[in-house]
Amino acid sequence: MALAFTFPGQGSQAPGMGRDLAAAFPAAREVFQEVDDTLSQKLSKLMFEGPADELTLTANAQPALMAVSLAVVRVLEKEGGFALRDRVALVAGHSLGEYAALAAAGTFSLSTAARLLRLRGEAMQQATPPGTGAMAALLGADYDQAQAICAAAAADPETGKREVVEIANDNGGGQIVISGATAAVDRAIEGAKAAGVKRAMKLPVSAPFHCALMAPAADAMAEALAAAAMAAPVIPVVANVTAAKATDPDTIRDLLVRQVTGTVRWRECILAMGTMGCDRFVEVGSGKVLTGLMKRLAPEASASAIGTPADIEAFLKAL
């Protein structure tokens, strides 16, 4: 069985994340300490204890989720003798998880990934004034239907002015997330209901991620990534915006900039990894969101998650 590691994105954070890892493994404690030192913040305390609303702030959630994923990777490598480059065929991450995937594959150092994700979170938050953007989930919609709903909702019926509303995430299994100007997203929700989409609801997010309104954040990331030290990954990464393998650092840099405003093509990423021979998918880090999606996207593949000491023990035992 060819093994792929996947890395979760925003929404997988929860108070208590990483606490058991830190208690059980010196390698995990080292990761959390390095991230705390890099960001000059006791992010680990916020991860372990909350409060949830502060942890959910995108500038905290992004480096925190990466830190838990990398803590698991370090424990597997240092204490489990698991060599990623020999055992894992492909890596991929959902949105910010792509940075965790790249750090696991050696493209970024841990401290570089933490700094980039802190900046990314801040830049995405500041790209739009509060309340002007929104995101919504369309459950039971396919990609083409969601595209048509967005196209119809883009025009303000009173002024004829076009507003941004785009597909942010194609998660598969009938789960599409749209993003854009608040009024346009509201019109898309109404349009989805009229089109018979099973469920259309706004998401509790602080900014409209992965749409054209994030252009200022893409510019900030272009500048930061141009200055960041990057190496070729030792394992190919399947990129969010192309659903194809990438190994060249300059290409990866460009893809990460495009990812800020582009659609996360997760459904296509998973299907592509399947066609590349992966039939075992392991979600590395906090939560089991991607594992749930995986079971709908590729029911014939093996899907599991490792985020706790017990998970790590079971994973290593099963090798």
Image (cartoon, helix red, strand yellow):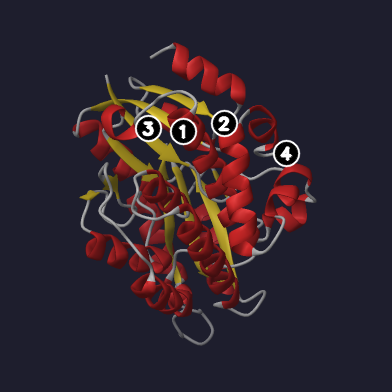
Position in image of residue 233 (x %, y %) = 28, 49
Compare marks 1 and 2 and give the one earlier in the sequence.
Answer: 1
Residue under numbered circle 2: 307
Distance from Cα at disc 2 to Cα at disc 3: 21 Å
Callout 3: SS = helix
What residue sits 50% from the left and 26% below the top? 79
Instruction: Please tell me whether mark 1 sits on a helix, a strand or a loop.
Output: strand
- Give the distance between the C-alpha atoms of the residues marked 2 and 4, in whole angstroms: 12 Å
Q: Distance between the residues labelled 3 and 1?
A: 14 Å
Residue pointed to by mark 3: 297
Q: What amino acid is at disc 1?
A: Glu
Q: Classify residue 147 as left or right of residue 191.
A: left
- Numbered disc in front, either 1 or 2: 2
**Residue at the outermost top position:** 317
Asked if the residues shown at circle 1 and circle 2 are in contact, with their CB atoms under 8 angstroms apart, the answer is yes
Residue identifier under label 1: 283
Q: Which of marks 2 and 4 is nearer the N terminus?
A: 4
Q: In this view, does 50 lie to the left or right of 129?
A: right
Q: How far apart are marks 4 and 1 (CA)?
A: 18 Å
The three-letter amino acid code for the residue at tag 3 is: Leu
Q: Which of marks 4 and 3 is nearer the N terminus?
A: 4
The residues tagged by marks 4 and 3 sit, at their Cα atoms, a distance apart of 29 Å
Please report whichever mark, 4 or 1, sits nearer to the chain's N-terminal start: 4
Counting residues from the N terminus, which is met first, the one under dot 3 or under dot 1? 1
